[in-house]
Image (spheres, helix red, strand yellow):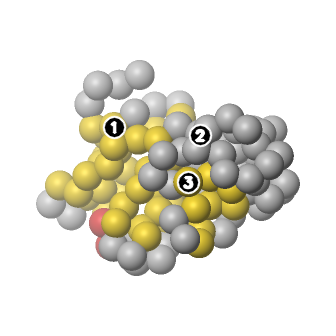
Amino acid sequence: MSEEFVRFCEASEIPSGAKKHAKLNGTWVLVCNVKGRLLAVSAICSHQEKPLFTGRVRNCKISCPVHGARFDLETGEAVDLPATKPIATYAVRVVGDWVEVKL
């Protein structure tokens, strides 16, 4: 994995309450803006490798739109079945007008 931060998108593209996904260095990443705080996680559910980016974000958790599993956006922990494995989390920062993610 990379040791460097990679540009993800312009900060204005993820206002509070929004989320955005992109493929960075071959890895699908989802960045969610939860009440002004940017959190970056894997955009793929650990249960059956389904995309999370259309899932609902609520109470700092994202739900898998396919099977309903939920993941904590801060820790990646699976908090509801059928998922039992966590998803990856990534460091995120804003530099100038850009959101950057460290894989």
Q: Nearer the viewer, residue 71 or 26?
A: 71
- Report the residue at 53% width, 31% height from top: 26
Alpha-carbon span between mark 3 and mark 1 = 19 Å
Q: Which of marks 2 and 1 is nearer the N terminus?
A: 2
Q: In this view, does 41 lie above or below 14?
A: above
Residue 42 appears in the picture as rendered = no
Q: Which of 50 and 75 is in front in this view?
A: 75
Asked if the residue at tag 1 contacts the one at tag 2, i.e. Cβ–Cβ closer than 8 Å, the answer is: no
Alpha-carbon span between mark 2 and mark 1 = 15 Å
55 sits to left or right of 89: right
Question: What amino acid is labelled 2 in the image?
Answer: Ile
> According to the image, label 2 marks what residue?
87
Asked if the residue at tag 2 contacts the one at tag 3, i.e. Cβ–Cβ closer than 8 Å, the answer is: no
Q: Which of 27 and 83 is in front in this view?
A: 83
Which numbered disc covers residue 102? 1
Name the mark nearer the viewer: 3 or 2: 3
- Report the residue at 47% width, 41% height from top: 89
Which numbered disc covers residue 14? none
> According to the image, label 3 marks what residue?
72
Alpha-carbon span between mark 3 and mark 2 = 9 Å
Q: Earlier in the sequence, mark 3 or mark 1?
A: 3
Residue 67 appears in the picture as rendered = yes
Label 3 environment density (alpha carbons within 10 Å; few <14, some 14–19, many ≥20)? many
